[in-house]
Image (spheres, grey):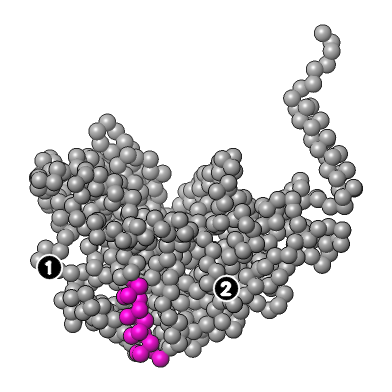
Amino acid sequence: MKKRKISPSQWTLLGLSLIVVLVLAAVLFKGGGGEKIKPALETSPAESPSEAAPAREAKKVQLFFLSEDDSSLHSEQREILAGPSVVEEAERTVKELIRGSDKGYISPLPPETRLRQLFVTKEGVAYVDFSREIMEKHPSGSSAELATVYSIVNTLAYNFKPIKKVFILVEGSEKETLGGHINLSLPFVPLYSLNAR
Amino acid sequence: MTGLNETTTKRLTCFSLLFFSLLSLAAAQPTLRVSAQDNDGYTRVIVTFPSSLPFALEKDGTLLLVRVNSRSTFRLKTDPVKSRLIKAFSWAKSNDLYIIIIEARHERFRYDPFKVEKKHQLAIDFYELAAPPAAKEPAAEVRQAPPATEEKKELPPPVQALTPAEGIRTIVIDPGHGGLEYGAKGKFGTLEKDITLAIGLRLKALIEKNLAFHVELTRDRDMDVSLENRAAMANNHRAELFISIHANSSYRSHANGSETFFLSLNASDEEARRLAYLENNSADLDKPLASENQDDIRMILWDMAQSAYLKQSQRLAEIIQDELNSLLGTKDRGIKQAPFKVLTGVACPAVLVESAFISNPQEERDLARGAFQENVAQAIYRGLVRYIKLLS
């Protein structure tokens, strides 16, 4: 009767510690993977390619930016940390897009914007949830809104096969437009005709 | 995946709850409140005024408009709508007029308003009417309604009143943005909403002076109008053409020129095929349907009404762009397709004209000049004349 029962909360604690130990072990042996617990919700400095440890696997992605020369989207190659899933890689890619170009291209996303969350449905629709700055700091205008939308949509669809369509959310909810023009209430298919040749 | 969807929904709910509670905290201004509740056999909408204010009611298709005259400013607070008959509330305002828009799910309803004087309340009871059989005069349905206690005027019969009676043809001109939503802003402070209104008014004058068309503006002053209501206005007026006027803005400071857009369906190949089927068979939509599901079909198409008019819209865009090129002296950016919110629900040929770039300092100065605005209006007008001739 005096035998101690393990309460559910203790089980949880036990489980959690087990996970921590496992993850620590993974980090020690593989030398990476901190993102596994907290999938890239905050930008960790180690994620920028320059500081990435050489042992980590990198993936090359094409980011699509605006150029002052013409109104099409221009690609710029960037290395991001690979794996473990498309969602994590897509998150890193969108963050690089917000961070901007190294070649002097224009990023059509307000730099204050944060990526809040990203997930991909079975049907291949990526829901990309941005902070309010993507609307509040947006200059509005048809061309500006088209550039913002399709730099995100083309970048994601071009680099990730499982992503067929992109639905842009702001602060967790569906918005009509960014600034009164382009319809955000339907998912976007990529429009590669906007990309420069 | 459902789990994730649920998370999003929960966040959405939390966020909107927070938003609305903040709103109510900030409500130092008098508040006008609108709510709807389903009862047995009718839906009651209650409008609570901050004080006793004069108002007038008008039914317009699926909408019931409550016009309220007041010089003081107040906030509008709407309770979330969960009703089988009432779809949504929205509102528009100008200097001393507020219009509360009560949107029903369909136009077959009658309403019975009465005042609750003590509480400064207006209660409007909505009764759903049965779909009129094709043989019967729809007006007869309405006449069965008991007379409204407050409003002496005849209830307008639903759609028929909006049909042009003696061949009156309507063009709807949509000056982009307005009110708090000012659109893009130039480096010298020019606002897109002011330019679009100036051009819109000039275009209206040109058409009414020279063509046998009635022009309806989605706004004729600086006021907020939702994108959905702009499209609804075109459809409720049975517009034959819809022209949305805008001034462009880009992240690129050198971006310049004029372009004309029509809607892109933003659809996958498979979806595009399905929509193309609709488009190719859209002639059928004008014929009376044998089945009784006509309203269902209309409802399904409503969201993407423009998809049936893409070819005509493209032709209209080409002609207008051609005129812009010859009159404005701006760079020809051609015609383009993009998923514009304001165009999706418009059930007639519809284009969006980006006259020039307000983000380009040189073009901003142009846009602010009356002579340039007149040229934009003139170019669109000439394009319309050519398009109309093409059809006749």
Residue at the image position 19 percent from the left and 55 percent from the top: B287
Q: Which segment is the magenta one?
A: B313-329
From the viewer's perspective, is B20 left or right of B116?
right
Measured as percent of width and height from the top left, residue B29 is found at: 42, 55
**Going by the picture, which residue comes out furthest to the right?**
A28
Residue at the image position 22 percent from the left and 39 percent from the top: B127
Residue under label 2 = A195
- Membership of B358 in magenta stretch: no
Type of amino acid under label 2: Asn
Q: Callout 1 environment at 10 Å: few (<14), some (14 to 19), or many (20+)? A: few
Type of amino acid under label 1: Gly
Q: Callout 2 environment at 10 Å: few (<14), some (14 to 19), or many (20+)? A: some
Measured as percent of width and height from the top left, residue A185 is found at: 46, 56
Measured as percent of width and height from the top left, residue A89 is found at: 70, 56
Residue at the image position 15 percent from the left and 57 percent from the top: B161
Closer to viewer: mark 2 or mark 1: 2
Residue B301 versus residue B193 in the image, above or below: above
Question: Can residue A8 be spotted in the picture?
Answer: yes
Residue under label 1 = B167
Question: Can residue A185 be spotted in the picture?
Answer: no
Residue A131 versus residue B125 in the image, above or below: below
- Secondary element under disc 2, as helix, strand or loop, is loop
The chain letter for the residue carrying disc 1 is B
| Magenta-colored segment: predominant secondary structure | helix
